[in-house]
Image (spheres, helix red, strand yellow):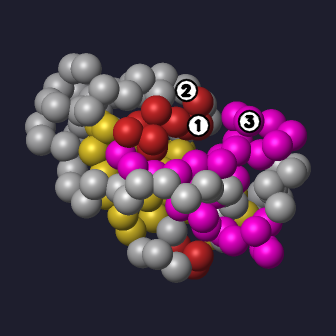
Amino acid sequence: MTPRRAMAMIGLTLAGLVLVAPGRPARADACPAGEGTTVVVDFGDLGGGVRVGCAPSASTGFEALSQAGFSVTTLSSNPAFVCRIDGLPDPDSEDCVDTPPGDAFWSYWTADLGGTWSFNTSGAGGSIRGDLE
């Protein structure tokens, strides 16, 4: 892992959708500079606030979430889509079968250190690239 791979951000757009089996709690610290990928999950309107964890050797967003201690469940119809992170949203509001509507999904963001975040169309299945993801 290069020092440029410093942070990952999984953001929530509106009401985000994600299924999670109970997992270990995320480490509540960012990675030291150059020592992994920092993962930031913003639960937005789902409750749970913003949580941060460190993924020491991830090469994809899914690996980063797992290594940082976040539990992830994908859609049963398309495992490239995240449905729940750490149990949110709950199964009563999202069954994790089909792709969610455009106003209710987890989004993935990328930035250079000191730069502006931008939407990453590769999502959590893509390779970690640049400084911040």
Q: Nearer the viewer, mark 3 or mark 2?
A: 3
Residue tagged 1: 123
Which residue shows up at 14% across the image and 30% down it?
34
**What's the distance in space between the residues labelled 2 and 1, CA to CA?**
6 Å
Quadrant that contains the N terminus:
top left
Q: In this view, does 3 lie to the left or right of 27?
A: left
Residue tagged 2: 126
Amino acid beneath label 3:
Pro
Please state which of residues 26 and 106 is positioned toward the viewer in this rendering: 26
Amino acid beneath label 1:
Gly
Q: In this view, does 42 lie above or below 45?
A: above
Which residue shows up at 45% across the image and 64% down it?
42
How far across and how far down the image is residue 14, in percent? Answer: 64, 69
Asked if the residue at tag 1 contacts the one at tag 2, i.e. Cβ–Cβ closer than 8 Å, the answer is yes
Amino acid beneath label 2:
Gly
**What's the distance in space between the residues labelled 1 and 3, CA to CA?**
12 Å
> Which secondary structure lies at badge 2?
loop
Residue tagged 3: 79
Q: How many labels does the image show?
A: 3
Asked if the residue at tag 2 contacts the one at tag 3, i.e. Cβ–Cβ closer than 8 Å, the answer is no
Q: In this view, does 80 lie to the left or right of 98?
A: left
Predominant SS along the magenta part: loop
Q: In this view, does 85 lie to the left or right of 40?
A: right
Q: Does the magenta stretch include residue 83?
A: yes
> Which secondary structure lies at badge 1?
helix
Alpha-carbon neighbours of circle 2 within 10 Å: few (<14), some, or many (≥20)?
some
How far across and how far down the image is residue 110, in percent? Answer: 42, 40
Please state which of residues 2 and 29 is positioned toward the viewer in this rendering: 29
Span of residues in magenta: 68-94
Which of the 4 image quarters holds residue 89?
bottom right
Quadrant that contains the C terminus:
top left
